[in-house]
Each structure stands twice: as C-alpha cells, then as structure tokens.
Amino acid sequence: MKPSRPYLIKALQEWLLDNDCTPYLAVDVAVKGVMVPEQFISDGQIVLNISPSAIQNFVLDDEAISFNARFGGVPMNIYVPMAAVLAVYARESGAGMGFGMEPGADYYEQELDGSENPEPPKPSGGRPSLKIVK
C-alpha cells in the first residue's frame, strides 16, 4: 500500500481550513532535500503557514510538498520531502497530528537512512509532543 502521510496531510489541511483555522506545517530541516528559508529555522525545525492565503502553487504528492511563499517580502520556492514532515496543526489551538507512527511511516524511515532493510524503531520512552509557536 502507498504511505498514508500525503493523504493525512491533505485531510488535516482541509479540516483545519473548514474550521476557520490556520494550518501550520512543522518541518525537520535536517532531512535531505528540504528547501526553506534558513533565517527562520529554530532548533532544527521550521513552521510554515500552509493556508491558501499565504502560499501559491501548492502541490502535495506522494514524495513532497512544494509551494511558493513570501518571507519578509522575499518570494521563495519551498520544497519539503514527506520524510521531513513532523506535524500539521492549527495555529489557533494546536489541534492536529504529529507524524512518525502512522501506517506507512516506515517507508519514510527507509528514505531517511537510505537502507533497504531498516532496523525497527526503538521506543523512545516518552510521549510525542508539539511545541506551541507564537
């Protein structure tokens, strides 16, 4: 089966927009292929507003998310491989979903380490969490 991450991201974005929320995309910038403005990276992550009013030419496919946006008035092409997507959530409430344990997530783990037979993930012992960004 195809990984579920692209479908979940699109569904979460639509759900948040239908509820008059601003969808934010949390991205791990250490993943190979990520193209984002470096001046806005914090702790190895960047949070991007993926509301239609903030972006243009939004494309979400099985491999990546890409769009055009302005940062400080400067236009930039954004490219986020699916393996780099950490979460989609509402700016207003934090409602949303983090990624890494959904069906098909192991496909992206293979992509990250480049191996054909990845080791099973080790339990981290903690709960996943989202950071509130203001």
Image (cartoon, helix red, strand yellow):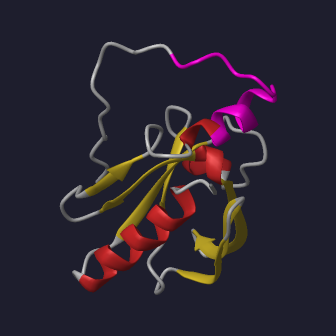
Q: Is residue 74 magenta?
A: no
Quarter of the figure that contains the C terminus: bottom left
Residue occupying the far left of the picture: 93
Is 107 placed above or below 114 here? Answer: below
Q: Is residue 41 visible?
A: no
User: As rendered, which of 57 and 106 lies closer to the eye?
Assistant: 106
Q: Is residue 77 left or right of residue 105?
A: right
Q: Which residue is located at x 23 percent, y 58 percent?
A: 95
Q: Which residue is located at x 60 percent, y 75 percent?
A: 73
Q: Is residue 117 left or right of residue 19?
A: right
Q: Quadrant of residue 44?
A: top right
Q: Which residue is located at x 81 percent, y 30 percent?
A: 114
Quarter of the figure that contains the N terminus: bottom right
Residue occupying the far front of the picture: 1
Q: Is residue 112 magenta?
A: yes
Is 129 placed above or below 93 here? Answer: above
Q: Quadrant of residue 56?
A: bottom right
Is 99 placed above or below 69 here? Answer: above
User: As rendered, which of 39 and 36 lies closer to the eye?
Assistant: 36
Q: Which residue is located at x 66 percent, y 41 percent?
A: 107
Is 124 placed above or below 41 here? Answer: above
Q: Find the magenta span and give its range.
A: 107-121
Q: Is residue 35 visible?
A: yes
Total numbered badges shown on the rendered structure: 0
Q: Quadrant of residue 21?
A: bottom left
- Image coords of residue 34 (percent x, y): 72, 49
User: As rendered, which of 13 and 115 lies closer to the eye?
Assistant: 115
- Image coords of residue 109 (percent x, y): 64, 33
- Image coords of residue 65 (percent x, y): 65, 65
